[in-house]
Every structure is written in structure tokens, then in C-alpha cells.
Amino acid sequence: LESYHPLARAMEFASFRAVEVADFSDTGRGLAVLTDVKAGDVLLEVPLKHCWTAGRARKVAELSKLVGALRDKDLLNLHLMIEAKKGDISPHSSHVKALPSLASMALPGVSWTTEELAELEGSEAQEQAVSLQEEVEE
């Protein structure tokens, strides 16, 4: 499975019930449903102990002094950045490598043109979009 797709290695702890890792020409990597499904059917299961959670982030030594000072979302983001910086020595390296870069994602505000941003002149949305673009460039 790993040789088929880099995401497969990152999902080695997942229980694939009705999906498989696939590449789609129009949207990129993802999961394809293999059979007809009904509402409530389980398609994929990942044990919580293998998920990125705020609880796990709170236990990361590099983040210990920040626990309580940051929102859970920020702790998770920092945890991902720390693991990405570790590279191949991180036990999470295969998963981190499989994640898309911010620049490759069509995030609102990140991919907006100068003209589109000009339409938001003076709004908080424009300020946030410009700030996000600057962060992605860094």
C-alpha cells in the first residue's frame, strides 16, 4: 500500500472498510469509496491514539510552557510544525510528508488575486486575507 501512495503509509493505523487511497485528476489525493454506502455506514476508522489532538499536543515537551496560554487549534498547529521541522527523525514523518502545503491548498484569502482583495477594501476580511497570504509566503 505504501508504494501506491504516500498517504497510505501515514494511514497505516486506519481501518479501511469501504474506501481506498486514490489520486483524482481534478482535486488531487483523497479517498475513493469502493462500494455503495448508506447513511451511517463506517467508511474509515482511525484509533484516537493515532490522531492529532490537543491532548497529544499538550504532552509535547517543546510545548509544555505554552499549555494554557494558547488555544487548542494553535497548539495543534505548533505540534505539526515541530514534527515537520524534525523531518525523518519524527515518528510522524510519513504523515507530515503526506500533508498538502498551505500554498497548494485553495484556502479562502490565500489564493485571492489583488483585484479580489481590492473589492474588500477597508474590511476586516481583507486584513485577515492579506495577513494569511503573508504567513503562507513566509
Image: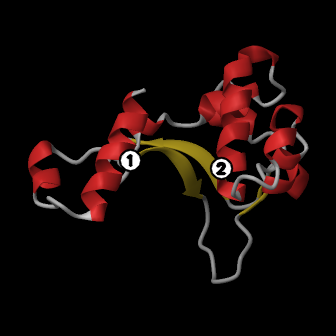
| Residue depth check, mark 2 versus mark 1: number of the one nearer the observer | 2
| Residue carrying label 2 | 74
Name the element at disc 2. helix
Q: Quadrant of the C terminus?
A: top left
Q: In which quarter of the image is the N terminus?
A: top right
Query: Visible in this render: residue 62?
Result: yes
| Residue carrying label 1 | 27
- Number of residues whose C-alpha sits closer than 10 Å to that of mark 2, classed few (under 14), some (14–19) or many (20 or more): some
Report the coloring of the rendering: secondary structure
Establish if 77 lies above or below 70.
Answer: above
130 left or right of 101 in image:
left
Sequence-first disc among 2 and 1:
1
Establish if 21 lies above or below 118.
Answer: above
Q: Nearer the viewer, residue 27 or 71?
A: 71
* Residue 55: percent from left, percent from top: 86, 55
**Picture quadrant where residue 114 is located:** top left
Name the element at disc 1. loop
72 left or right of 129 in image:
right
* Point 72% across, 48% down: residue: 75
Query: Visible in this render: residue 94?
Result: no
Marks counted in the figure total: 2
* Point 71% across, 48% down: residue: 76
**Picture quadrant where residue 90 is located:** top right
* Point 76% across, 49% down: residue: 52
Establish if 33 lies above or below 87.
Answer: below
- Number of residues whose C-alpha sits closer than 10 Å to that of mark 1, classed few (under 14), some (14–19) or many (20 or more): few
Q: Is the Cβ of the residue at disc 2 closer than 8 Å to that at disc 1?
A: no
Q: How far apart are marks 2 and 1 (CA)?
A: 27 Å
Q: Which of 1 and 12 is in front in this view?
A: 12
- Kind of residue at badge 1: Thr
